[in-house]
Image (cartoon, rainbow, N blue to C red):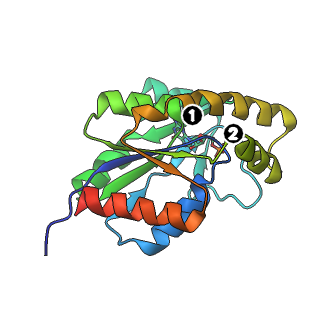
Amino acid sequence: MAKNKAKLIIFTGPSGVGKGTILADFFKKVDNNIVYSISNTTRAPRDGEINGMHYFFISKEEFEKLIKENAFLEYANYSENYYGTSKKFVEEKLNEGKSVLLEIELQGALQVIKKCPEAVTIFIKPPSFEELEKRLRGRHSESEEAIKKRLIAAKEEINNANKFHYVIENKIVDEAVDELIKIYNKETK
Ligand code: 5GP
């Protein structure tokens, strides 16, 4: 059997594009040679989110302490909250021969692209900006103010899609998942 190649995979796309839905299905369908990197964040958990599963929910003080300790591979201030990827987790998994998927926003993605030019980068885009706005509003998880901030960030993110190796349009979830599986297999097998 061909040996599996452990890769760092960056998965980015605007808030509301459906990254979570795609990934939930992706991880059900692929082998266990890839792991999801659980980020740290200072934002409050949404209904149903579990600490240590969706995120490590930590305080601003704890986050800033981790920044000083150089514990993050990347971090960003997004929509007035910190989000960051644990360097230790990523290094450990790659050393174990596992691929690691980072679901992160643009600023963080650009930091990782600089530090780890060998990373495979994937951007998920919505069929249109109007559709994105509809989805973001439809999930009722953010205040109007937070939605506005996310839409501003989304414009910037979509404008940078050309910096990624692969762009997947999330029009039909099943098709987007299939495309992601194909990329994963191509890059790691
Ligand atoms: P949400 O608050 O909707 O869970 O996440 C907001 C944005 O932050 C999403 O685009 C998500 O992909 C991104 N994000 C989640 N974890 C990280 C991280 O560790 N680093 C960075 N830079 N962005 C992250």
Decide which of 117, 39 is in the foreground and name it.
Answer: 117
Image position of 78 with respect to 186: above or below: above
- Residue 63 is situated, as x and y percent measured from the top left of the image, at 56, 32
Residue 129's label in the rendered image is 2
Q: Are marks 1 and 2 in contact (CB under 8 Å)?
A: yes
What residue is drawn where x is 64% and y is 34%?
A: 154
- Residue 9 is situated, as x and y percent measured from the top left of the image, at 37, 48
Type of amino acid at the residue the image marks with label 2: Phe
- What kind of element bears circle 1? helix
What residue is drawn where x is 35% and y is 57%?
A: 183
Q: Quadrant of the C terminus?
A: bottom left
- Residue 54 is situated, as x and y percent measured from the top left of the image, at 59, 56
In which quadrant of this rendering is ligand 1 seen?
top right
- What kind of element bears circle 2? helix
| Residue lying at the far top of the rendered structure | 68
Q: Residues within 10 Å of mark 2 (few under 14, many from 20)?
A: some
Q: Which of the two discs, 1 and 2, labels the residue nearer the N terminus?
A: 2
Type of amino acid at the residue the image marks with label 1: Ile
- What residue sits right under mark 1 in the picture? 158
- Residue 165 is situated, as x and y percent measured from the top left of the image, at 36, 41
